[in-house]
Amino acid sequence: MISTVALLLCGPAAFLATAILGAAVSRRTFATRLVYGAAFVISAVLTAIVAGHLAGNSGEASATLPLGLPWTGARFRLDGLSAFFLLVVNLGGAVTSLYALGYGRHESAPHRVLPFYPAFLAGMNLVALANDAFSFLLSWEFMSLASWALVMAHHRDEANRRAGYIYLVMASFGTLALLLAFGLLAGPAGTYAFDAMRTAHPGPLAAGAVLVLMLLGAGSKAGLVPLHAWLPLAHPAAPSHVSALMSGIMTKVAIYGFIRVVFDLLGEPAWWSGIAVLLIGGVTAVLGILHALMEKDLKRLLAYSTIENIGVIFASLGLALAFKANAMPSAAALAFTAALFHVLNHSFFKSLLFFGAGAVLTSTGERDMEKLGGLIHRLPVTSFVFLIGCVSISALPPFNGFASEWLVFQAILRSPELPQWGLKVIVPAVGGMLALSAALAAACFVKAFGIAFLGRARSAAVERAHEVDRWSLAAMAVLAAFCLLAGILPGFAIDALSPVSLSLIGDRMPVQMAEPWLSIVPIAESRSSYNGLLVFAFIAISASLTAFFIHRFASHALRRSIAWGCGFTDAVPAAQYTAVSFAQPIRRVFGGFAFRARETVDMPAPGSLEPARLKVDMHDVAWEIFYQPITGAIDFATERLNHLQFLTIRRYLTLVFLYLVILLLVLALWP
Amino acid sequence: MAVILELAIQGAQMFSVLLLAPLLIGFVRKVKARLVRRQGPSVIQPYRDLVRLMRKEVVLADNASWLFRVTPFLIFAATWVAAALVPTFATGLEFSWAADLIVVVALLGSARFFQALAGMDVGTSFGGIGASREVMIASLAEPAMLLIVFSVALVAGATQLSTVAAFMGSPEVGLRVSLGMSLIALVMVAIAENARIPVDNPATHLELTMVHEAMILEYSGRHLAMIELASFIKLLLYMSLISCVFLPWGLDSGGTGPKALAIGAATYLGKLAMLAILLAVFETAVAKMRVFRVPDFLGAALMLALLGTLLLFVSRSL
């Protein structure tokens, strides 16, 4: 009888075999179909195995492979948490491979994508399975490097090279932080297996340091502000299906790492750890979506919106930490389940939206929204599914984004019972930030859909656009269906998540599928309940009843005419609202503190025929506050250290001697 | 039997909302006209307008897409469902457990989302200007509204509107600072959300000042009728919300017989009339703001709501 873990480990092995095969045949015409087809089959099989494990509530399983460090082996383990994240990874991988079967045919450099794509999937699978620090870090680095290679697929573009470089630097920094965190967890005995870490509880100082290091390490990969700088550069630089994997799936693997260490290995959290995570989450959500609103590149807008959603997830995890520290397990289970449900939902709609952006890119060659417009006429199916993605991500009922945000708000409403004053003040403020980011997200996606898909075409490329291939459409339709299903039947997902929250929090949300009419009731029915199915049915019924009534009794007459323009018939599509002008009111409201935005109007002298010019000056504050001083300091230090390179042999010998003396002194004085 | 009665009450509430909404608008207009010593149109003029619009042909812009034609029905359905979830003259609605106050706010958000999209569909500058200003206003009004929901929910211990209304009617509530702040904030949000003076002027078609009207400029005929009716219902919804949360007296708590129902209906109409007169007086007394003063107005609402919530986190009795 082969164990589930061994079965699941065959997955990465198969992915790696596909990668090698892909490298060998990458220049042949059938390579695209071969690699993506194989990746699709492997991911689908893994999804089925993991879903079976989750549904059957089959507990834990572990395996040790004679790989890695000599005499110790590499440990792997499957529990509820890894099963859930493996489901997210492989479901996303399967749909992405399906999409890539069509999208990948337009790839200009397939030999730079095909070998790394399955390797990337293998890396993400291994991270979720790893059960010791060594295999975890190795898989983590493997995942980072494979995705870096994919970011560099179109390396002739200067911007992509810069994105790749920054990504590499940030990924190394993140891994360094993780390495230190595991070092602290391992303690002086150096037990690097997760099972040993779980039983050894570090002191409060060490635990605090581990939390900070995890926020740095996993947070930089997930895109927490201010460590997000690489994300909006690197995610859009990759081919669109890889962007979907990076934004929709890889950020979730980072969240898995954070949960694994902070909720599982670290033991009981301190109450202030909730404050740190909550605040960072709230700030990340607001700044991420504000940046997204200012963006006019469709894929970068989506990448920034990923940062917002990561912020929501972290804020919810922070709530769970605060509740867990204060022995309120039912509230902690609610916040934790809300976070995990949002992880699942975000992987659905963010992949869907990146697929849509990829479809727009294939059919028009444009990512810049200022050159799109009117695509709803040219790409009817793509625009319909993209609209579903926009509605879901804007947290509008009855779609899935709303269901998880609703749970987050319900968790916030449990928090006045928290005893600490710090939390009492922070939680409502963070609740306000989440509400603000939800409203701004709706504004952002009105802009994304309205500018890119509605209105009139702003360039000739759009007028020539055609609907994309069937594979891509099928992948997008599947995700759109998932968005609706998870929105109207959230009880399934919540119940499936109960083993995860039971094992990490020690409590679970009440059973949802037993509720009448499939509503979700997080606490008690008199307190709050939501029934996505009924809301959906009500809207559908009343809309169709109204439509029936109107068509039965009101006038049928309909006449096409030119749009009303106050007497002007402005034929120029350039006179439409643009992405930048759409965001202008919001920039004026929030830009002052978020971007230090300044508008200057350059008026010509009276009588002059020069045009007046409006100049908007915006800054990335995080970049200026955190990154520029660091790069400046490194420049300064290297400049100084440069002198060391040209010393005489006598001076080198003096330096070595001095160093030895200092070292001995330190040793002598060390208690 | 009880189920049938409750279903009947639910149905009665849904359709009374539909029927009352134009009357409420007509009444507000009439009071406003009388306040400036005009005769004003009859209170049933909105019904006549709706019927007239239904009979007219639809003039559709050349490049309007399917979204433009579907949106009026979506807006209407979302607003109507939201309104049906707010208790008017009786609590204990049959389907009140299907959605709570947060869902009501989010349903109105859905309606606005599609309205803004429809504004951008034809590709004229007016639609764009309206949509972009509407989302700016919403980006402040919606978080303020959610924070108000938080305060109310913390006081009542539930986000379920029926529970909230029943709790607010009980004597243990008393006067609370946080509820006072929420009420002021809710009134400010309601003014902004319903495009009333001083945030927007429902009677204007002057390009530079309009927000709501700019988005629906391309609509005509039956489509326009649906959107107008939805905006009437929205005003009624906010007034019902204010009266069921902050003026819960006389509300029938379910299953107490026809007398209680009658009292509930009569007090409900009285509350609506009072709020409508207050709205008309307020609108006559103040001038419309510049668009970029609106964020200050809504920012004040947001801060009030946040302060109210914060007070409740500090002490449950404030």
Image (cartoon, rainbow, N blue to C red):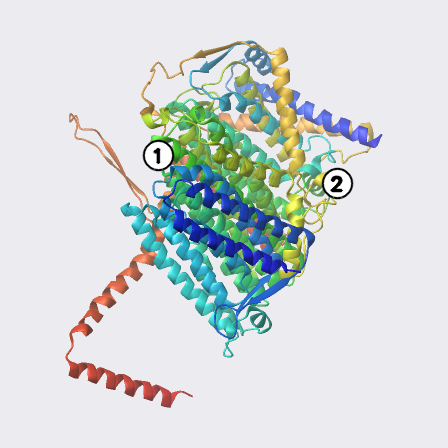
Q: Quadrant of residue A531?
A: top right
Q: Which residue is mark 2?
A: A516
Dot 1 amino acid type: Glu
Q: Residue furthest right?
A: B1
| Residue drawn at (31%, 21%) of the image | A572
- Asked whether A46 or A358 is in front, the reply is A46
Q: Is residue A591 above or below residue A609?
A: below
Q: Is residue A225 above or below residue B18?
A: below
Q: Quadrant of the N terminus of chain A?
A: bottom right
- Asked whether A392 or A132 is in front, the reply is A132
Q: Which residue is mark 1?
A: A366
Dot 2 amino acid type: Pro
Residue A364's spot in the image, x, y percent?
36, 31
Mark 2 vs 1: CB contact within 8 A: no
Position of A149 with respect to B310 (left or right) is: left
- Asked whether B217 or A48 is in front, the reply is A48
Residue at mark 2 to residue at mark 1: CA–CA distance:
48 Å
Q: Chain of mark 2?
A: A
